[in-house]
Amino acid sequence: MKIVKKENGFTLIEMMIVLAIISILLLIVIPSMTKSHEVAASKTCEATMNLLQSQVAAYQADTGELPADLETLKTDGYVENITCPSDETLVLDADGQVVLGEN
């Protein structure tokens, strides 16, 4: 009497197909993740600029004059940080507007 043993598992062809599908999915997902990161960084910088602009208005309401620069807001306790999370420098222009500065 012969005992036939059935082996379960994946064949080499099946494994190659699965790896090809995973590779295609990664090619689709990775570029969109990179773009999402760039968009998020941009939006975070815009939010920081809006926050600083509102604190400039609060400083002006409290003191009756515009701050000399953004560092004044930091030293007087209006804000903790005066740069974008991406380390872009922000400055206060002559009109009291918060704008991106030159690095």
Image (cartoon, rainbow, N blue to C red):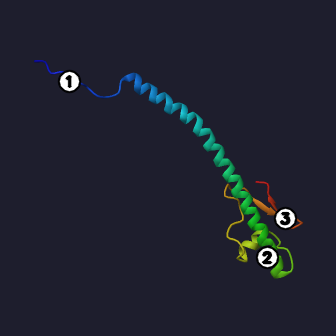
Q: In the figure, residue 96 lies in which quadrant?
A: bottom right
Name the amino acid type tagged 2: Ala
- Residue 98, percent from left and from top: 81, 63
Task: Examine the rendered structure and indicate whether residue 78 appears above or below residue 51.
Answer: below
Q: In the figure, residue 32 lies in which quadrant?
A: top right
Provide the residue designation for mark 1: 5
Secondary structure of the residue carrying tag 3 is loop
Q: Nearer the viewer, residue 98 or 91?
A: 98
* Crowdedness near tag 1: few (<14), some (14–19) or many (≥20) residues, C-alpha within 10 Å: few
Secondary structure of the residue carrying tag 1 is loop
Q: Please report whichever mark, 1 or 3, sits nearer to the chain's N-terminal start.
A: 1
Q: In the figure, residue 62 lies in which quadrant?
A: bottom right
**Residue furthest top in the image:** 1
Identify which residue is drawn at 79% across, 76% down.
58
**Real-space Cα separation, disc 2 to disc 1, in angstroms:** 81 Å
Q: In the rendered view of the protein, which quadrant contains the C terminus?
A: bottom right
* Crowdedness near tag 2: few (<14), some (14–19) or many (≥20) residues, C-alpha within 10 Å: some
Provide the residue designation for mark 2: 58
Name the amino acid type tagged 3: Gln
For the residues carrying marks 1 and 3, which lies nearer the camera in this image?
1
Q: Is residue 1 left or right of residue 34?
A: left
- Residue 11, percent from left and from top: 36, 24
| Mark 3 and mark 2 residues within 8 Å of each other at the beta carbon | no
Q: Is residue 32 left or right of residue 18?
A: right
**Real-space Cα separation, disc 1 to disc 3, in angstroms:** 79 Å
Identify which residue is drawn at 72% across, 65% down.
82
* Crowdedness near tag 3: few (<14), some (14–19) or many (≥20) residues, C-alpha within 10 Å: some
Task: Examine the rendered structure and indicate whether residue 3 appears above or below residue 97.
Answer: above
- Residue 45, percent from left and from top: 72, 57
Provide the residue designation for mark 3: 97
